[in-house]
Each structure stands twice: as structure tokens, then as C-alpha cells.
Amino acid sequence: MSSSLAAIIGGAAGAITLLGIIVLSIWFCLFRNRSISRNSENGSSDPSLQAGRNVGTELSLRGGVPSPNPLEARYFMLEDISLATKNFSDINLIGVGKFGEVYKALLNDGVIVAIKKRFAAPSQEFIKEVFYLSSIRHRHVVSLLGYCQENGQQMLVSEYIPNGSVSSHIYGASQLSGEKLEFKNRLSIALGAATGLAHLHALNPPLLHKDFRTANVLVDENFIAKVADAGLKNLLARIDTAGPSFQMVDDDIFLDPEVRDFGGRFSEKSDVYSFGVFLLELVSGREASRSQISESDQSVVEWVQNYRDTSDISVIVDRRLGTSFTTEGMKEFIQLTAQCVNPSSERRPAMNYVVSELDRIREKEMSLTTVMGEGTPTVTLGSHLFTALR
């Protein structure tokens, strides 16, 4: 009797347990369907948005929680980006690049960012590339913070660099005078940019910039140089089978002649060539593509390529530098520039060597020159290149 009763009780308990499992399963399915429905109503049916959210990268500009991984790309909502740029007002338009229009944006937490926007179809490859590029963090490389992909638009959200490009300071609308144009300052900018580019080349696999130019070297409030648009050319090549939606003509003066004239492949050494042209503009204060030596047909790049120690370097050096440098240091700088723009890629140095040489030249210049009083350069082992010109 007791055995029969125990069997009955055991069977009832098992039935109740089975019924509970069935009820929980039905409830879970209904709850999941309602969640998906709500996401669809909020506009998240776009596959590009789902991809961003599935990896936990969504960040609302109104105070959303960032990804636990600070190096992971964040997803920014279009609604919030519009708010941060005042609906992409022309007042916030700070430039146009290969990706498209660039806007300055103020986030709700007070952080200022730069947003690049273009019209393009949703792409999983775009998200993949953004995640890779956002993982690259270095003091001398502009950080990619996140992205947005909604309503037929793609956007890149990067850190904002307040002092703009080096080109604007040496021959553009924001040309500086005084101490910021001293040779030591330009050496510091060159060293920072070289360090950033060398870091890209040291990645595994190396990341080739492919579009290094003076306009893509930015300086912050402390005039620390940062390499911008790293990997952008690769991103556009991978997501645009018919080419970027916003076309710009490349400035051939920065392009490795082996790539430009003979259809060669990009390499670390082609970036080194572009860096050499950057050094040339930095020291001459002129656009290399528009500069000639005196009234001859020889460009400044050709002059540097043919440079010898006995050459008159006063024809190439920016006169605004005055005598704030040593002749020896300037000649070593021009020699390094000539190595970088050597027509043969095999004869160009690696970026690590360029970094070490710039660091050495800068240290020597710092030890041989002093500043007496605010903004007044005095050279202890000086150059008299421009004495006859004043």
C-alpha cells in the first residue's frame, strides 16, 4: 500500500515538473518574440545595426554605457549624431576628405569628436574594418572611436584634434609665426609623425597608410603630431567595388614613383617616400607640388633627390626659420629627407631608422640651441644662411 502511494506521488511530481518546464519554454519564446518586435519598431531591423548591437558596441550619445573593452568600436545612433552636429550644420563643417564631409560634434558629456559622413549602402565589411581600425591606439595616431550606419549613410567617429593639419600651419590659412615655426618645433612634429607611422608598420600584419601627406598629420593643443586617416584607403577599397562615393584626385607628388609610374605595389617603403615629401614641406614651408627652385623647372623634390653636402641649402629652407637652427642639424635633416625620397625603394630607410635619426637630430639641436626670453631664439652653434638676405 505504501509502495503504491509512493509511486503515485512520484508520478504526480514528475508530471508537475514536466508541466512547469513546458510553461517556462512557452513564456521564453513569447518574451523573445516581443523583444524582437520592439527592436524592429525602434528601427534596429537594419542588419548593420544588428551587427553592431550583437557585439555589444552600441553607445548612445545621451549617456549610453560604453563597451567593456575600451578599444572596441562603439555604435553611435544617427539621431544622436544629428543632435551633436546640430543636424549637420554648415557651422560644424570643418572639411571634406576622401571619405566625405567632416563635422565637428559636441557630445552630451562634453566630449568633442570629428565625424566623417558619406552616403553608402549598409556593409558588413565596413563594420569589420571599423572594428579593426578602432583597435589601433597610439599617442601619435588619431583614434577611431566608433561608427554609425543608418538610412543609407556611413559615418566614422574619431577623436577631435583641435589645431588642425600641419599643412594649414606651414603654408595654409593658419600659418603661424614665432616659436611654433622654429626648427626644433618642426623636428618635434616630424618625430611624432614618424613614430605614429612606424607604429602602423610594426603591426602584425603591417598597416600601410597609402595616403600619408602633410594634410593627414594633425597637431593637438600641445602641438603633438598625430597621423590621421590610417587605413582609410584600405577601408574604401574594400567596401567600394566602384571606388569611393566621394572622389578626390590624389596629389601625385606624395606618391611613390615606383607605384605611380610603373604600377608597383604599395609597401612600407612607399609610405617612407610619402613621409620624405612631408619632411620636405615641413622644412621648406611650401607645397611640394607647387614649388620650384628659383625660376628653374626643377621641383623641390628633384632638388632634394639630387642634394649633395656642398649644395646651397638656403634655396630650400623656409626663411621664416630665421637662424633658429644649426647648419649641421639642417644638413642632416635634408640628407635624411633625400634618403626617404630616393627614387629606388630599396635605398630608402625603414621608418624605425627615420625615427631614430629624427630623434638624434632633435636632441642635438636642443642641446646646441637655447631660447633667451620668450619667443626669442638664440643659436649657440648657429646658421648664417640668411644673413645676406635680411
Image (cartoon, rainbow, N blue to C red):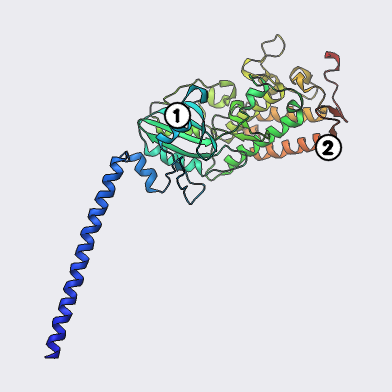
From the image, tell me which residue sits under label 2.
367
Of badges 1 and 2, nearer the viewer stands 1
Identify whether 279 is placed above or below 10: above
Q: Residues within 10 Å of mark 2 (few under 14, many from 20)?
A: few
View extreme (right): residue = 380
Q: Residue at x 42, y 34 (%)?
A: 238
From the image, tell me which residue sits under label 1.
117
Identify whether 6 is placed above or below 169: below
Tell me residue 339's x, y (percent).
69, 30
Kind of residue sitting beneath label 2? Ser
Say what secondary structure mark 2 lies in. Answer: helix
Q: Quadrant of residue 39?
A: top left
View extreme (top): residue = 295
Tell me residue 122's x, y (percent).
35, 34
Q: Nearer the viewer, residue 131 or 301?
A: 131
Q: Residue at x 41, y 26 (%)?
A: 243
Q: Residue at x 67, y 14 (%)?
A: 292
Q: Does residue 11 appear to the left or right of 112 in the view shown?
A: left
Tell me residue 318's x, y (percent).
74, 20
View extreme (bottom): residue = 1
Tell me residue 166's x, y (percent).
64, 27
Q: Is residue 117 visible?
A: yes
